[in-house]
Image: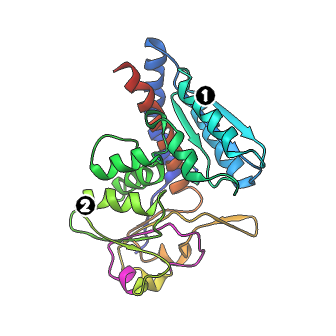
Amino acid sequence: MTAKILDGKKIAQDYRAKLKKEVAVMKAQTFTPNLTVVLVGNDGASLSYVTSKKKAAEAIGMSSDIIKLEENTSEEEVLKIIRGLNENPQVHGILVQVPLPEQINESHILEEIAPEKDVDGFSPINIGRLYAGVETFIPCTPLGIMELLKHADINLTGKEIAVIGRSHIVGQPVAKLLTDSDATVTLLHSKSKFLKDTLKRSDVIISAVGKPGLVTVEDVKPGAVVIDVGNTVVDGKLRGDVDYEAVKEVAGAITPVPGGVGPMTITMVLNNTLIAAQRLVE
Ligand code: GUN
């Protein structure tokens, strides 16, 4: 069996075409949605992510700005900038790229973003709203994964799902969304005792660790759906957590790296920014 390739690039393209139409309607009737991204420091990967987000926003007709701050910027300066963005009526979505330099406490920054502009869904209020089951911004990678799963022809009800990695950005929120979809989720991490056994019996594996080669062909049940969130640069090339070439021969569906989850994350940033803008005119 050869897996169905879950082509995130193509799925994202189709999704963005839909968003572009909605943005055009919004611009004709009211205003142009704006996404403002704050980047602190000189991390090359982060710069490339935020540039992609800006380009993607502009490609669907939104406006987008990047506020680029020096590596040694103080926490107070970043907080001041966020307060300004919170109060700026022309800004609808605010995203602060993480990780942040060590002199800045990430929680303090995320707490300062106005929940109604927090398109990443990282602020404590929005995280709380997600777990309380009320309307919020769902973090973009989990939202993108749910969209990819829709294309995997799998009914999640009663399925065994292994999520590897317990971050607030991916593992924990995706486990919550999958549980809400009636799946049985095991959230695995570096201290888990039965990681490999759990993978082997799972109908869906989602790996969000950043460890190339972590998920091997021996770990995957024939026909299982495998979503690879890993993106580690090895010898100048982007690699996921999954041994893609071998696993695609046994899986039912699989995401490539690059071109799987990554384009979906960016698409969901755009999705959430449009929602933030639309809520203002509802
Ligand atoms: N760093 C890695 N992924 C993300 C993301 O989805 N949002 C933000 N703000 N920073 C990230």
Task: Point out the stretch of residues depicted in magenta.
Answer: 197-215
From the top left corner, tell me how far across and down residue 15 is, in percent.
44, 40
The CA span between labels 2 and 1 is 44 Å
**In the image, 67: left or right of 3?**
right
Residue located at (59% from left, 37% from top)? 56
**In the image, 170: left or right of 59?**
left
Q: What residue type is labelled 1?
A: Gly
Q: Nearer the viewer, mark 2 or mark 1?
A: 1
From the top left corner, tell me how far across and down residue 41 is, in percent.
75, 49
Q: Quadrant of the N terminus?
A: bottom left
Q: Name the residue under label 2.
A: 155
Residue located at (70% from left, 54% from top)? 103
Q: How is the image coloured?
A: rainbow
Number of residues whose C-alpha sits closer than 10 Å to that of mark 2, classed few (under 14), some (14–19) or many (20 or more): few
Residue located at (60% from left, 35% from top)? 82
Q: Mark 1 points at which residue?
A: 84
**In the image, 237: left or right of 21?**
right
